[in-house]
Image (cartoon, rainbow, N blue to C red):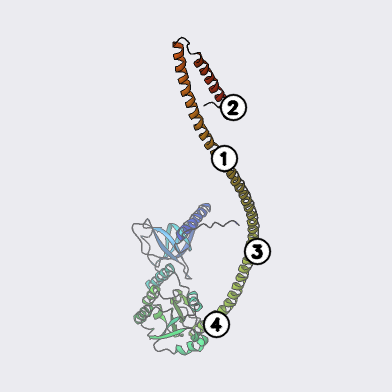
Amino acid sequence: MSEITIQQYKPSEVIAIFNDILSRQNVQTGGKLVCIRGIYIAKPANLQWAYCYDILHDETTQDELTICVTHKQRENLTNGNLVDVFGTLGRKITNKSQIQLQLNVSRVDIIKNLVIDEIEVKRIEIRHQKTTKGFQNVDAILEQILYKDERPHIALIFAATSITLADFTAGINAGKSAIDFKEYRVSFANPVELSNCLRRVDAMQYSTIALVRGGVNSTDSLDDPIVLETIVSLKTPIISAIGHVEEKLFIKQIVDKVVSTPNGLGQYFSELVETISEKKTKSRAFLTEQIKRQFQQQLESGQKQNKELQEKLSKFNETQIKLQEQLKKQQDDSNKRISELTVSIKKMQETNANLQKSLSQLTVQHTKTTKEIAIAQSRTIELENLLNDTKNKEKKYKWYIILLAVSLVIVILFVFYFYNKYGYLI
């Protein structure tokens, strides 16, 4: 089975790829000119950049759109102006992997000056900061802690003089069995005191902070920019359980989770604990079944591998037996050849011994014959000398000649005898 090749990317590379796709789609749409009416909100600008990325806020809702304007275009604009903005819409992916609509401005017409006050402008800026920073998923954070069989630590910030705790306690029920709660009291009517309390609690690294208060005649202090800015700066996720369901507070737009009432907050924690407990029970059963299935698959795979190994082992044994038979045959052939070679060597040794014996006898005979030839040669010399003397004495001694002839005949006969017997002359 061929391996599946998976291409690996960095987050920045994926964002760049999709930005390229979106930019090409924007070109294909032809850049249609649109006119959008809204409330202008300026953001801090970098003078080194060619464009400023400000906000166009909806008149009736909390929705907003990023607009790209030049420094020249924003010279006559003031926060809170109701404006008509002309331009082309584009899309891009932010570094937080969010697709963002952006209006590239070509012209701005002011319809009305200061349709909202400075406090409202400040609140809109704060909400934009929170949107840019991003909201934390309170549900996921608490679920993750509970799944680990750990206890989340929740900071409950109540109004100093309220009786909200009773409403919260009425709804908490099962939540206390798995969550630790810590109560703090502070004056909600004092924005500075409330902000300082939030910062202190934030430094204690709770799992979540909850602002808890029932419905009252006035909750304007909770929408004070000081409190709102503090909430945006918190590192700890924050839940709002302020007021009745029908009350509309700006603070609810910048917290990480909104629960309608204190009693609803208690119910939220109880339902969260019960839901996680049920999920853990189901997940354990599912995990058990999954482990069982995996074990069964591993067992079947092991049995299959074992069968294949048995077949391979059987073939290996058969091959080994054949090799042993071939080796035995080769060993027998080798032993037979060694035996034959041993016999041949033994015969050669016997033949060599006989040859040595014959050579020894021939050597003795040769020595004897050499000695006899030497005697004969000596006699021949004597006879030659005698013959010479006889010739010098004018053949006075015929008998010596006759004797010499007889001696020569004897020698010649002896030589022929030796040759006939041994096959060579000395």
Q: Amino acid at mark 2?
A: Asn
Find the distance from the CA under tag 2 to the CA under tag 3: 88 Å
Q: Residue 66 at x, y = what percent?
A: 44, 63
Whether residue 104 is visible, yes or no, is yes
Point out the frontmost of discs 2 and 3.
Answer: 2
Which of these two is toward me, 95 or 361? 361
Point out the frontmost of discs 1 and 3.
Answer: 1
* Mark 1 or 3, nearer chain start: 3
* Mark 2 or 1, nearer chain start: 1
- Please report contact status of discs 2 and 3: CB closer than 8 Å, yes or no: no
Disc 2 packing (10 Å; few <14; some 14–19; many ≥20): few
Q: Amino acid at mark 4?
A: Glu
Q: Which residue is mark 3?
A: 307
Q: Secondary structure at mark 2?
A: helix
Q: Amino acid at mark 1?
A: Asn
Q: Is residue 89 left or right of residue 189?
A: right
* Mark 2 or 3, nearer chain start: 3
- Residue at 51% x, 77% y: name it: 147
Res. 31 mark: none
- Residue at 49% x, 56% y: name it: 17
Find the distance from the CA under tag 3 to the CA under tag 4: 49 Å
